Image (cartoon, rainbow, N blue to C red):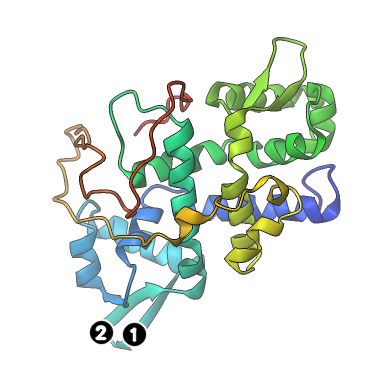
Amino acid sequence: MSLTGLPADTDADIARVSEALTMITPRWNVRILLALSGPPLRHSEIVNRCAWLYKSQLHLKLRSLCDAGLLQRSALDARHVTYGHTGRAKALLPVLPLIVSWAEQYLEQPEGPQSAIEQIEDSLTLLTRRHAAAILWTLKVRGETSGRALATRAVPAQRWTNIYSPLRQLVADGLVDTDGKGQPYRLSSAGEGLAPVLAALSTWSAGQPFTQAARHPVWGPTLTADSHTSASQQVRTPAARTRPDPMVQTQPAQRTHGQNTDLFSHPAPVRPALALPTGGIRR
C-alpha cells in the first residue's frame, strides 16, 4: 500500500527510512548500541556500561533491539549469555557522525554545548515528527509547493488540510520555510543540509553499502565530496555513569570543545551565529 503520491520507488524509500527511524529513535537505543560497540558482552558487563538504566529497563531494551535485528543474543549455556552487534548495527555506526555534523551546524544549544549523543537524539526526534519524511522528500522532489499540492503528494490518503499541523511543526523546527499564511512551502537551508543524513539512512535501511549514499536519486545529487568525511571517524563508547535518583532532575555537565568527552574523535566545527530552535525537544 502506498504511503505517498510519489513514484513507487520513492514511496518505498520513504517507508523504509520511516521504519528505520522508528527503530533507532526510541530513548536509550542509540546509547545502548554505542555501549555495545566491540566484542559481544555478557549481561553483567552491559549493566556496568549502562548504569543509567535500571536492569528491568535494560532487559526490555535489549530484547527490543534483538527483535529489530540490531543486536544478537548468544547463549552458550544458561549462565553465559552475550549480546553483540549484528551486521546491520555495525553498518549503522557510520551514519551517526553525519547526524552530529548536521546538528553542530544547524541546532541551537541554548544551555551550552551538548554531547554528541544528545545531538543525535535531538536530531532523530526532529526526523520522526509526524509525516516528516514524506514532507521532506516531497519538497526535495517538487521544490517550492503549495500546502494543498504538497498534501496530495505527501499524505494523499488524508484530508488535505491535515497537512498543516505537521507542516507548522516542521517550520517551527526550522526544516521547512514559508513566507507566510497561504504562501508555498520549501525546504530551509537546514532541511537541504539533511541530504547526507537522509541519503545515508536510506542506504542503510535498504541494506546497501554506505558508499552508495552519494548515488541516492533524491538526496545524492546535492552531496559534496566531503559530505561523508566525518563518517570515517571512530565511534567511542559513552562512559558509564552512576544512575541518578529518578526523582531528581539533573543537568548535563557542560564541556568545552577541547574536552575528550564526545562520542566521536573529530573536533566540533564552529557553530554559526544563527542556529535552529529544536522545537522544545531538549531532554
**Front in this rendered view, residue 253 or 20:** 253
Q: Are marks 2 and 1 in contact (CB under 8 Å)?
A: yes
Residue 234 coordinates in the image, percent (x, y): 36, 62
Q: Amino acid at mark 1?
A: Ala
Q: Residues within 10 Å of mark 1 (few under 14, many from 20)?
A: few
Q: Quadrant of residue 58?
A: bottom left
Task: Write the residue at 68% across / 37% down.
Answer: 136
Q: CA distance from mark 2 to mark 1?
A: 6 Å
Q: Amino acid at mark 2?
A: His
Q: Residues within 10 Å of mark 2 (few under 14, many from 20)?
A: few
The quarter of the image holding the C terminus is top left
Q: Residue furthest bottom?
A: 76
Task: Write the residue at 20% across / 71% down.
Answer: 44
Question: Left or right: where does residue 15 sit relative to residue 248?
Answer: right
Q: Is residue 49 visible?
A: yes
According to the image, label 2 marks what residue? Answer: 80
Q: Quadrant of residue 203?
A: bottom right
Q: Secondary structure at mark 1?
A: strand
Question: Left or right: where does residue 197 sit relative to residue 71?
Answer: right
Residue 79 coordinates in the image, percent (x, y): 23, 84
Residue 80 coordinates in the image, percent (x, y): 25, 84
**Front in this rendered view, residue 225 or 260:** 225
Q: Quadrant of residue 74?
A: bottom left
Task: Write the residue at 48% across / 25% down.
Answer: 276
Q: Secondary structure at mark 2?
A: strand
Q: Which numbered tag is attached to residue 75?
A: 1
Q: Is residue 34 above or below residue 257?
A: below
Residue 125 coordinates in the image, percent (x, y): 49, 39
Q: Is residue 176 above or below residue 87?
A: above
Q: Is residue 270 above or below residue 259?
A: above
Q: Earlier in the sequence, mark 2 or mark 1?
A: 1
